[in-house]
Amino acid sequence: MGFDRTLVMGIVNVTPDSFSDGGRWATTEAAVQRGLRLLAEGADILDVGGESTRPGADRVPVEEELARVLPVIEQLAAACAGLDRPATVSVDTMRAAVAVQAAQAGASIINDVSGGLADPNMAEAAAQTGATYVAMHWRGHSNIMDDLECYDSIVADVRSELASRVDALLAAGVRRDQIVLDPGLGFAKAGEANWPVLAQMESLQSLGFPVLIGASRKRFLGMVVAGPDGTPVAPAQRDDATAAVTALAAAQGAWGVRVHEVKASVDAVKVARAWRQAR
């Protein structure tokens, strides 16, 4: 998916237990309506997920994940096709079987938070479908990821580990032009470790691939805008901070940002684009 500005990916969680909006869009009808609203607010991509990756989350059976996402993807892909501007659907999954069926249902992007590590068949699935494949930095599932925050140099380690994933993907037949990289903010990075990754995004961009930033409502934002007593603000109160990250990421040339609330980030991208063009 080509671009001349940072794309805004709107999150559609078809789950009862996501960290910030679990249950609000858990039915097919509610999720589709949510996606249509995000499209109306300017989303370029709708990222449909049926399995929570919040800290501590357990996995759901593949049959349940499929039942959650496929009807939503089908309807939203049809809605995107009817727009007078480019928009597309992504599937947020770590499973090759879900990725393949989602692509058949109309998804043109596979957003895999495990970067292919959770399912040994995922790289083959990405190659088979030809979909854009987002490979995120990941060290382990949600129930253990907070125990895996151990880095010699956070920026260098994230870059090196993603470079290894790129090598594995290319060896499995995934084309270079399919790959997008995501530094995995919040995954095995609970707090302060996220900031150097964001501030030095050019280190990851130097690998030669587009970069997706997914900071929306995450814990480290709740910490930085904490109240006077140091208590992190609730996830739904982190949208202003999320939009600030969108502006910064777009100013650095991010391919996309993944957000819960679209409108403020759409505006932030416009501001960042104007700023870049005036330099």
Image (tube, grey):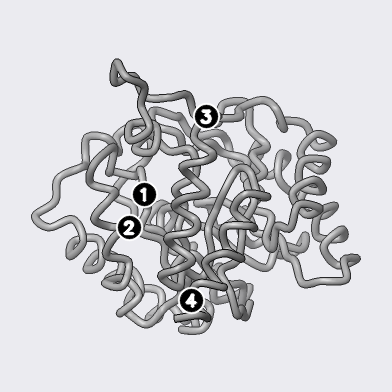
How far is mark 1 from mark 3, CA to CA? 18 Å
How far is mark 2 from mark 4, CA to CA? 18 Å
Task: Indicate which disc residue 26 carries.
Answer: none
In contact (CB < 8 Å): disc 1 and disc 4: no
Residue 52: where, in percent of width, then height? 53, 36
**Mark 1 sits on what residue?**
185
How far is mark 3 from mark 4, CA to CA? 28 Å
* Left or right for 186, reference 151: right
**Mark 3 sits on what residue?**
237
Disc 1, SS = loop
The first of marks 1 and 4 along the sequence is 1
How far is mark 3 from mark 2, CA to CA? 21 Å
**Mark 4 sits on what residue?**
276
Question: Within 10 Å of the Cα at label 4, are there few (<14), some (14-19), or many (20+) other Cα atoms?
Answer: few
What's the residue type where badge 1 is placed? Leu
Question: Within 10 Å of the Cα at label 1, are there few (<14), some (14-19), or many (20+) other Cα atoms?
Answer: many
Residue depth check, mark 1 versus mark 3: number of the one nearer the observer: 3
Identify the residue at image location x=48%, y=76%: 276
* 163 over 157 or under it: above or below: below
In contact (CB < 8 Å): disc 3 and disc 2: no
In contact (CB < 8 Å): disc 1 and disc 2: yes
What's the residue type where badge 4 is placed? Arg
What's the residue type where badge 2 is placed? Leu
* 123 over 26 or under it: above or below: below
What's the residue type where badge 3 is placed? Gln
The first of marks 3 and 2 along the sequence is 2
How far is mark 1 from mark 4, CA to CA? 24 Å
